[in-house]
């Protein structure tokens, strides 16, 4: 027995399948496990907890029978309108559906559904690799039904639609994004006709909800090399509909013999780089958006050449608008991305100057708990192809990191808490909350960041007394 066969057998030995087998046999209907779960068995990928079961008959009736047979009390949810049902059992989520034929109207993803054969059901699925079905009935338990050579496509690494791609994609335009996402996740190629069809139908993406689009973007960004997906989105003409801010970074302009880099390709390199350092999805978003302010701020200056003045500030503002447009959360995640975009050039600027302790302390203070992620982003941002510059930037960057460590061990600026609190200042000088208290606190913070005094209570207390005196205040 080869390893795939062994894996199929082992997987189908999961207790849940024996209950489906029993239920289907008792009802006298055919039942199959189908879709991504089967695909991943063949690919040897880790199996998810979502299991799709299709039956030639009523999905709801089969689910009800399975729920009866499963030990313990089981939650079953029935969706009458769709003819589907869902059971949660242990860590698994079982989705039941009756085999169907579907036809779609032009402006909606909601199909008109009719009962159909297994083959009808396989036909209406997105890709041949997602249409593989394994029988769960006793007499042909584990038997594979693969009418579109999905196994061949799995072996060849090809994404292909079971039907004419124009039909499959216009039935459900989300599949255009799914094709690109699977190509990125699995390292597969989208078959040429399919790709042409995506490019031709790209404006159909307009009927999708932002939430669906973002879900696919998250999945692409969670891959080890997201650039594959973004390049495909760009090539298929989908990206302008989703992230025009990235498209605006494309291209190289030349004035008086001076060129700037192509910030679109640079951005994708930064995203790939960050993926080898961190799994954090939002850090990956920050990498994707770190330069978006460069398009609207680009200028050519005869003396200095190309400039992108204040692009970090402009970019951070654009992050908010972009998140809002894509219906992404406008919460601490957005603020995190915004802050990283805003600070994205800081460590590198420091690295290029003579690194002073004060500059490092300010960086640590401003970045706060985002410091480590900011440093990763900056490291990922070094994409120069000039080997001398590459090693110089990395050396400088390491120097900044080393300085940060030194300054941190000495001054504890990260998560800075003022050594003298506002309450204490008010108590000492018998003040109510007022501007003067804020002024003294700010002066203490500045003195610490500038290195005039250490980040310690006694020094801060003495400094406070002096500062207050210069403001005409005396202790009560
Ligand atoms: N499907 C489809 N068209 C879609 C979405 C899903 O034809 N737009 C079908 C495919 O057969 C797919 C199955 O429904 O395999 C289950 O879909 P889903 O759970 O969304 O995706 P998976 O293929 O299981 O993969 P993943 O979990 O990685 O998204």
Image (tube, grey):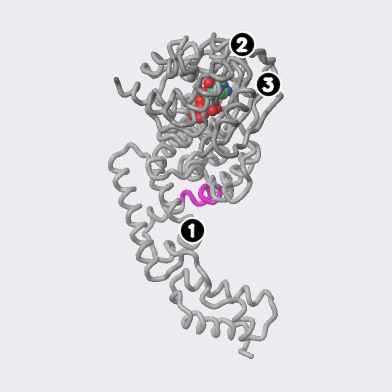
Q: Helix or strand or loop: what does disc 2 sit on?
A: loop
Disc 3: residue Cβ within 8 A of ligand 1's nearest atom: no
Q: Kindly indicate whether the residue at mark 1 contacts the one at mark 3 (C-beta within 8 angstroms).
A: no
State the extent of the magenta-drawn residues as a range: 338-345
Name the residue tied to disc 1: 369
Label 2 neighbourhood size at 10 Å, few (<14), some (14-19), many (20+)?
A: some
Q: Closer to the observer: label 3 or label 2? A: 2
Q: Kindly indicate whether the residue at mark 2 contacts the one at mark 3 (C-beta within 8 angstroms).
A: no
* Chief SS of the magenta region: helix
The answer for how far apart the CA atoms under marks 3 and 1 are is 45 Å
Report the disc number at residue 426. Answer: none
The answer for how far apart the CA atoms under marks 2 and 1 are is 56 Å
Residue at the (64%, 14%) spot, across then down: 102
Q: Earlier in the sequence, mark 2 or mark 1?
A: 2
Name the residue tied to disc 2: 116
Q: Earlier in the sequence, mark 3 or mark 1?
A: 3
Name the residue tied to disc 3: 110
Residue 106: image x %, image y %?
A: 68, 15
Q: Closer to the observer: label 2 or label 1? A: 2
Residue 79: image x %, image y %?
A: 68, 28
The answer for how far apart the CA atoms under marks 3 and 2 are is 17 Å
């Amino acid at each position: 027995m080869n390893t795939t066969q062994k894996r199929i057998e082992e997987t189908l030995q999961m207790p849940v399948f024996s209950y489906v087998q029993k239920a289907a046999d008792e009802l006298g209907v055919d039942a199959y496990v189908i879709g991504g779960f089967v695909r991943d068995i063949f690919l040897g990928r880790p199996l998810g907890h979502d299991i799709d079961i299709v039956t030639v008959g009523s999905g709801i009736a089969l689910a009800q029978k399975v729920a009866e047979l499963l030990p313990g009390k089981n939650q079953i949810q029935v969706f009458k309108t769709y003819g589907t049902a869902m059971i949660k059992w242990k860590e698994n989520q079982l989705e039941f559906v009756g085999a169907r034929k579907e036809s779609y109207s032009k402006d909606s993803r909601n199909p008109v559904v009719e009962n159909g054969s297994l083959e009808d059901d396989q036909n209406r699925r997105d890709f041949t690799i997602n249409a593989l079905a394994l029988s769960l009935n006793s007499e042909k338990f584990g038997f594979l039904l693969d009418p579109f050579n999905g196994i061949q496509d799995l072996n060849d690494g090809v994404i292909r639609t079971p039907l004419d791609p124009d039909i499959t994609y216009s039935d459900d335009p989300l599949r255009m994004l799914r094709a690109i996402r699977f190509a990125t996740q699995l390292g597969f190629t989208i078959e040429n006709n399919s790709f042409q069809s995506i490019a031709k139908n790209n404006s159909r993406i307009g009927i999708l909800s932002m939430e669906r689009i973002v879900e696919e973007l998250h999945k692409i960004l969670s891959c080890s090399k997201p650039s594959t997906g973004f390049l495909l989105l760009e090539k298929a003409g989908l990206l302008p509909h989703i992230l025009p801010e990235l498209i605006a970074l494309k291209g190289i302009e030349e004035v008086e013999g001076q060129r700037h880099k192509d910030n679109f390709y640079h951005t994708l390199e930064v995203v790939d780089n960050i993926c080898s350092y961190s799994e954090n999805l939002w850090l990956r978003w920050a990498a994707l958006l770190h330069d978006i302010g460069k398009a609207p701020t680009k200028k050519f200056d005869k003396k200095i050449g190309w400039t992108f003045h204040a692009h970090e500030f402009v970019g951070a503002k654009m992050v908010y608008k972009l998140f809002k447009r894509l219906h992404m959360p406008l919460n601490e995640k957005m603020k995190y991305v915004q802050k990283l975009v805003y600070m994205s050039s800081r460590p590198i600027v420091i690295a290029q100057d003579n690194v002073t302790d004060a500059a490092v302390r300010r960086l640590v203070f401003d970045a706060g708990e985002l410091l480590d992620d900011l440093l990763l982003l900056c490291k990922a941002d070094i994409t120069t192809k000039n080997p001398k510059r590459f090693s110089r930037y990395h050396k400088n960057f390491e120097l900044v990191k080393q300085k940060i460590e030194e300054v941190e061990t000495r001054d504890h600026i990260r998560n800075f808490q003022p050594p003298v609190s506002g309450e204490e200042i008010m108590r000492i000088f018998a003040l109510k909350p007022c501007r003067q208290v804020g002024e003294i606190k700010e002066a203490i913070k500045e003195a610490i960041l500038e290195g005039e005094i250490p980040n310690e209570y006694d020094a801060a207390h003495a400094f406070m007394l002096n500062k207050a005196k210069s403001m005409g205040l005396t202790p009560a």
